[in-house]
Image (spheres, rainbow, N blue to C red):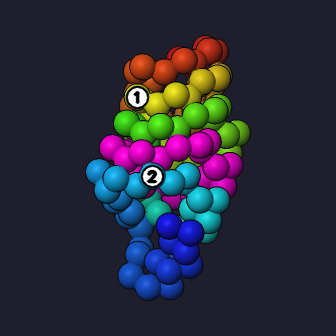
Amino acid sequence: MTDLATHYTKKSLKNWLYLANCSIERKIPPAIGDLTELIELELQYNYMSGEIPMEIGKLHKLWQLELYNNELTGKYPLGLRNLTKLEFFDASVNNLEGDIAVVGSVTTVLFTVVVIARFTGDWL
């Protein structure tokens, strides 16, 4: 997955990346931020670990982000505030913690799932 952005940006990937249930056991690479045409990113049901990279905030066209059922840790990156078109966000069933207001500051979010997580803050 290290060359994911380079490989797909110049080839066939246009706006949707679906890698759900692929048994991926890596961190989400910072190069994910180079896939600036994405509108949907689905990485659920894997074994992805580590923190959500700050570079995910470069995906300004993203309207759906699904990261649930992984092994992600840490806090949400402030870059999520840049996802102004985000309408669906699910990062449940991970080991994430911190102030959910990072996602709540995106006023277009219609559906956010934060089940089985440790969050603080007022975002509704």
Q: Looking at the picture, which amino acid does disc 1 mark?
A: Val
- Dot 1 falls on a residue whose secondary structure is loop
Which amino acid, mark 2? Glu
Q: Is residue 17 visible?
A: yes
Earlier in the chain: of badge 2 and badge 1, it is: 2
Structural crowding at the residue carrying mark 1, measured as other residues with C-alpha within 10 Å and reported as few (<14), some (14–19) or many (≥20): some
Q: Which mark is residue 93?
A: 1
Q: Is residue 16 left or right of residue 81?
A: left
Left or right: 14 in relation to 100: left
- Picture residue at 50% right of the left edge, 85% below the top: 10
Q: Residue at x 40, y 28 (%)?
A: 93
The image shows residue 23 at horizontal and vertical percentages of: 34, 53
Q: Give the image quarter of residue 75.
A: top right
Residue for point 41% across, 75% down: 13
The vertical placement of 44 against 104, above or below, is: below
Residue 66 on image: x %, y %: 40, 44
Q: Position of residue 7 (x, y in %)?
A: 50, 80
Which residue is found at the position 52% from the left and 58% from the top?
Answer: 61
Q: Quadrant of residue 52?
A: top right
The answer to whether residue 61 is magenta is yes
**Residue lying furthest left:** 21
Magenta residue span: 41-66
What count of labels does the image hold? 2
Residue 25 circle label? 2
* SS at badge 2: loop
The stretch drawn in magenta includes residue 46: yes
